[in-house]
């Protein structure tokens, strides 16, 4: 079975959206599809198209050459070859369809589950898949044939089971790639369950490769069934191409046409399927490596419960929108556990804006990923407690934790484009969490999505809702993500470097928008950034991080006017010295109608 070049995760957009229209522009693809459809139609309409009963024996027709009445002549038993060829197409297509359905039914769910969940699920499914591949298929088929009286459907189900590992491999590798996509993290923060993520994102992502695989699998299944029938394994009640080839093979020396007709039919059909698969694979394959990115997956937030300095568990922080106490984050590495966040504590009051500032690698993102349950699989967070809206997220079961995150927290990520699923319209991506997490009807969710898009400054909201992510600009995509983050009216919004990927003018607008929305909805807002200047006019308080620790925190004015730590003073100086970008930003900021803090 052929391994396929998979579409790069996240790209692709057009490749997936317009696959069929692009396919239809390929002459080879169109020809192959036309030939295949012709075979399918011939099989389906055989009772109408066949000039004779395929079982009708006419001794005068025995091994007769083609004539005006019998276009392909007669076989060794005196039956009309053309009619049998049409009925044989029916058997062949039916057998291939059964094998594909069984292969997809077993291989795709197993592959998607293995790729998405990983761990034990992945190991067990991979063992089973490897085991199936190690079994000699033809021997099993002969045993099944002997045990079932060569029932054709059972035989093709067995062929399908042997095809399942091929579907398993491609689905698993695609799911592995897609689960690393930021939009999967975003879906989890939005509170979507595993079932919904699997259905909405994973199965959709494997659709194109599965279609391609099916073209190849169908061809292989046809070859196998014809081989079995050629060997006499199968029922003789319906005409099939394998029996016809067997008949032709015996008279090949004297009447080669009897072998030629079914051989040509099988060869042309298999070639058509192979070309269809090849053209499709060519269209969806993006032969570039996916951009490296941080892998965030299963969360381990707050699983460890450490004792507070007093010896008692930290008290519930009911008055805080977000409270983190003594958070430590470590990663399992080849050299042992490496701690990257060393006892960070933060507190954000309802309606407050906190900036977490620090240079790259200071632990800002790890701190917030812990709160949002987005740490990678090899990351481990322990804390005296993490509370969101007074609820201790670290001590809640995963399902309740996700539900809580979905309803109470909005997340604005760093890279707007890769945080939107390329396969869905923007409207769908806004509506789905509102329905799934907030229990709105479709109409209510659409109305809310429209309203919030208009609120974030998107005037042609209808068009944007109908657009796919690649059809909008980066700034527009970030507005969409902000709309998504605030649509459920969360108490807390976490924005992780929300302007990094945007140009300076758009940065100012996006920051202004976040501030406006924060005031309007009275949300707490945490902005993670490396740029002191950017947060200066937005934040009420700032926590400065360095090497996994908070070196100082306090009101913005105080930190700016009297930084207690030399590192803070250095950061402030650096952001003010960065004159070019600061001047650009200031100009843009003034344009956006804001006064810049200097
Ligand atoms: N998956 C990982 N495995 C091991 N170490 C990691 C992993 N992810 C992050 N780290 C380490 O954790 C530390 C803090 O990273 P973090 O992403 O929180 O930095 P940051 O302050 O957000 O910087 P940036 O803005 O560049 O993301 C860094 O030293 C980083 O190397």
Image (spheres, rainbow, N blue to C red):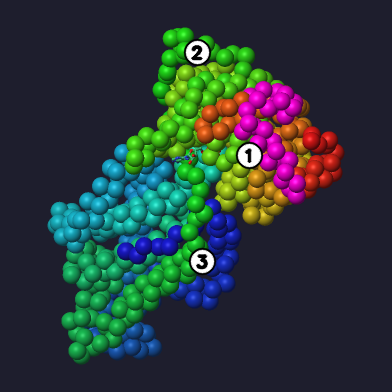
Classify 559 as above or below 83: above
According to the picture, the residue beneath numbered tag 3 turns out to be 283
According to the picture, the residue beneath numbered tag 1 turns out to be 530
Classify 223 as above or below 487: below
Quadrant containing the C terminus in the rendered view: top right
Horizontally, residue 590 falls left or right of residue 93, namely right
> Cβ–Cβ below 8 Å for labels 3 and 1?
no
Tell me if the residue at label 1 has its CB under 8 Å from ligand 1. Answer: yes
Q: CA distance from mark 1 to mark 2?
A: 30 Å
Q: Secondary structure at mark 3?
A: helix
Of marks 2 and 3, the one in the foreground: 2
According to the picture, the residue beneath numbered tag 2 turns out to be 314
In magenta, the rendered stretch is: 553-581
Q: Residue placed at 35% from the left, 65% from the top?
A: 2
Q: Residues within 10 Å of mark 1 (few under 14, many from 20)?
A: many
Q: Is residue 170 visible?
A: yes
Q: Residue placed at 35% from the left, 67% from the top?
A: 219
Of marks 3 and 1, the one in the foreground: 1
Q: Position of residue 169 (x, y in %)?
A: 35, 54
Q: Residue placed at 72% from the left, 43% from the top?
A: 577
Q: CA distance from mark 3 to mark 1?
A: 41 Å
Task: Judge by depth and name the residue closer to the eye, 569 or 526.
Answer: 569
Q: Quadrant of residue 36?
A: bottom left
Could you tell which of marks 3 and 1 lies nearer the N-terminus? 3
Which mark, by number, is residue 324? none
Classify 231 as above or below 580: below
Could you tell which of marks 1 and 2 lies nearer the N-terminus? 2
Q: Quadrant of residue 540?
A: top right
Q: Quadrant of residue 77?
A: bottom left
Q: Position of residue 400 (x, y in %)?
A: 49, 24
């Amino acid at each position: 079975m052929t391994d396929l070049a998979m579409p790069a995760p996240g790209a692709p957009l057009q490749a997936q959206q317009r696959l069929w229209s692009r396919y239809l522009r390929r002459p080879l693809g169109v020809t192959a599809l036309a030939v295949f459809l012709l075979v399918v139609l011939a099989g389906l309409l055989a009772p109408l198209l066949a000039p004779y009963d395929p079982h009708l024996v006419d001794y005068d027709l025995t091994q007769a050459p083609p004539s005006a009445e019998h276009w392909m002549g007669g076989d060794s038993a005196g039956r009309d070859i053309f009619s049998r060829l049409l009925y044989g197409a029916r058997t062949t297509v039916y057998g291939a369809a059964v094998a594909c359905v069984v292969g997809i039914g077993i291989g795709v769910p197993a592959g998607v589950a293995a790729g998405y969940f990983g761990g034990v699920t992945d190991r067990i499914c991979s063992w089973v898949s490897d085991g199936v591949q190690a079994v000699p298929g033809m021997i099993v088929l002969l045993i099944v044939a002997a045990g079932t009286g060569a029932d054709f459907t059972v035989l093709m189900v067995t062929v399908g089971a042997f095809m399942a590992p091929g579907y398993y491999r491609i689905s698993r590798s695609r799911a592995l790639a897609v689960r690393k996509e930021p939009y999967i993290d975003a879906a989890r923060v939005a509170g979507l369950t595993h079932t919904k993520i699997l259905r909405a994102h994973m199965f959709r992502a494997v659709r194109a490769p599965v279609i391609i695989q099916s073209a190849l699998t169908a061809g292989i299944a046809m070859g196998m069934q014809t081989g079995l029938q050629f060997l006499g394994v199968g029922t003789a009640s319906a005409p099939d191409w394998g029996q016809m080839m067997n008949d032709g093979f015996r008279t090949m020396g004297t009447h080669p046409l009897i072998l030629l007709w079914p051989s040509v039919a099988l060869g042309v059909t298999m070639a058509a399927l192979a070309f269809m698969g090849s053209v499709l694979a060519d269209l969806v394959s993006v032969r570039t490596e996916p951009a490296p990115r941080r892998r965030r997956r299963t969360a381990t937030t707050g699983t460890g419960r450490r004792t507070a300095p007093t010896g008692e568990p930290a008290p519930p922080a009911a008055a805080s929108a977000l409270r983190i106490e003594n958070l430590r984050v470590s990663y399992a590495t080849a050299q042992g556990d490496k701690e990257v966040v060393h006892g960070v504590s933060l507190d954000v009051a309802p309606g407050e804006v906190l900036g977490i500032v620090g240079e790259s690698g200071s632990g800002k993102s790890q701190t917030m990923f812990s709160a949002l349950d987005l740490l990678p699989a090899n990351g481990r967070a322990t804390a005296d407690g993490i509370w969101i809206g007074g609820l201790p997220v670290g001590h809640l079961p995963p399902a309740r934790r996700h539900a809580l995150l979905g309803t109470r927290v909005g997340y604005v990520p760093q890279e707007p484009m890769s945080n939107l699923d390329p396969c869905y319209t923007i409207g769908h991506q806004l509506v789905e969490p509102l329905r799934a997490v907030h229990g709105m009807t479709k109409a209510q969710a659409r109305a809310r999505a429209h309203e919030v898009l208009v609120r974030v400054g998107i005037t042609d909201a209808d068009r944007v809702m109908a657009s796919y992510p690649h059809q909008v600009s980066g700034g527009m995509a970030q507005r969409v993500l902000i709309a998504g983050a605030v649509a459920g009216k969360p108490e807390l919004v976490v924005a992780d470097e929300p302007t990094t990927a945007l140009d300076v003018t758009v940065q100012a607008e996006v920051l202004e928008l976040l501030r406006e929305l924060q005031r309007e909805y009275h949300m707490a807002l945490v902005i993670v950034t490396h740029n002191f200047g950017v947060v200066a006019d937005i934040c009420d308080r700032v926590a400065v991080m360095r090497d996994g620790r908070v070196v100082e925190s306090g009101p913005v004015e105080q930190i700016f006017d009297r930084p207690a730590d030399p590192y803070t003073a250095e950061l402030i100086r650096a952001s003010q010295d960065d004159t070019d970008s600061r001047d650009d930003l200031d100009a843009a900021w003034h344009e956006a109608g804001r006064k810049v803090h200097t």
